[in-house]
Image (cartoon, helix red, strand yellow):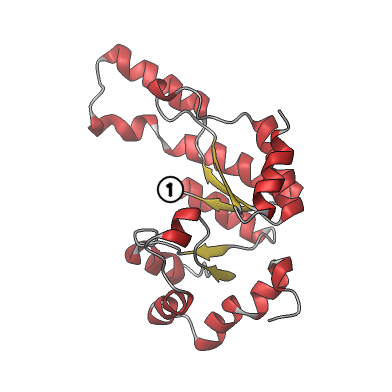
Amino acid sequence: LDLPGQIGEAIQAGFSTVKIFTTDITPSRKGRMVDFGDIWETFQVLAANNGLGVIHSEDNDIVMHMYGKLIREGRTGFENMAEVHNTLSEDVSFRRVIRLAEKVGAALYMMHVSAATGVSAIQEARRRGVWFDLGNGRTGHLRWDIAEKVLKDGFLPDTFSTGWTPEGRAAQVVDFPNVISKFLLLGMSLDQVIACATSTAARVFPVFQGRG
């Protein structure tokens, strides 16, 4: 099975995103996790074809270890969820995935950032020169309180986008002017939002080169 070749063909056909899980999430969902060797191969295809990796990133060893521990202790209620899907898991996994993407040159959309350790990994990548896009293709994909706090902390997006996913292109699409308006409302200047939508995007995405 030539999976890398098929991914490249799918991207060229207009399916520009690949969803990747670094964990099975729960013991009952075996088969979701993608090994890092395969992630590496996939990132190379994404980079070569201007695709986007959509990443659910947790450390599977830590997650499954904690599931086993809590099951043995009889603590399987939802109130213990944070002990399983914990900050260390996000810290270890985010750093590994981001570093791999940096080396290959792949673009990523990091889903479900829920811990300060994950945010720190992203901030460190920004200081190393990694650029960040804000993709708001569907309702529910942007929380006002989190966006406000991130901007207040000085972490501004480099570019804006909408409709990264097939679902985003087919349902609940948030149009591009709407995305721009949100960040004007959140405090970015007109010059900043225009740059995110035009000149900076033209430097980041090959398809836009010469158009910003």
Q: Position of residue 161 (x, y in %)?
A: 53, 68
Q: Characterize the local packing of mark 1: few (<14), some (14-19) or many (20 or more) Cα atoms within 10 angstroms.
A: few
Q: Could you tell me residue 86's position as x and y percent? A: 41, 35
- Residue drawn 38% across the image and 16% down it: 68
Q: From the viewer's perspective, is residue 52 above or below residue 200? A: above
Can you name the residue that lies furthest to the bottom here?
A: 190
The image quadrant of residue 44 is top right
Q: Residue furthest front?
A: 13
Q: Looking at the image, which residue is at 69% across and 66% down? A: 205
Left or right: where does residue 32 sit relative to residue 84? right
Element under disc 1 = loop
Say which of 204 and 170 sits in front: 170
Please tell me which residue lies in front, 6 or 56: 6
| Residue 181 left/right relative to 133 | left
**Quadrant of the rendering where the N terminus is positioned:** top right
Q: Is residue 191 above or below residue 91?
A: below
**At which x and y percent is residue 85?**
40, 34
Q: Nearer the viewer, residue 44 or 192?
A: 44
Instruction: Where is residue 66? Give x, y as percent.
Output: 40, 23
Q: Quadrant of residue 34?
A: top right
Q: Amino acid at mark 1?
A: His
Residue 197 sits above or below residue 6 on the image: below
Mark 1 highlights which residue? 112
Q: Decide if residue 8 is on the left or right side of residue 133.
A: right
Q: Quadrant of the C terminus?
A: bottom right
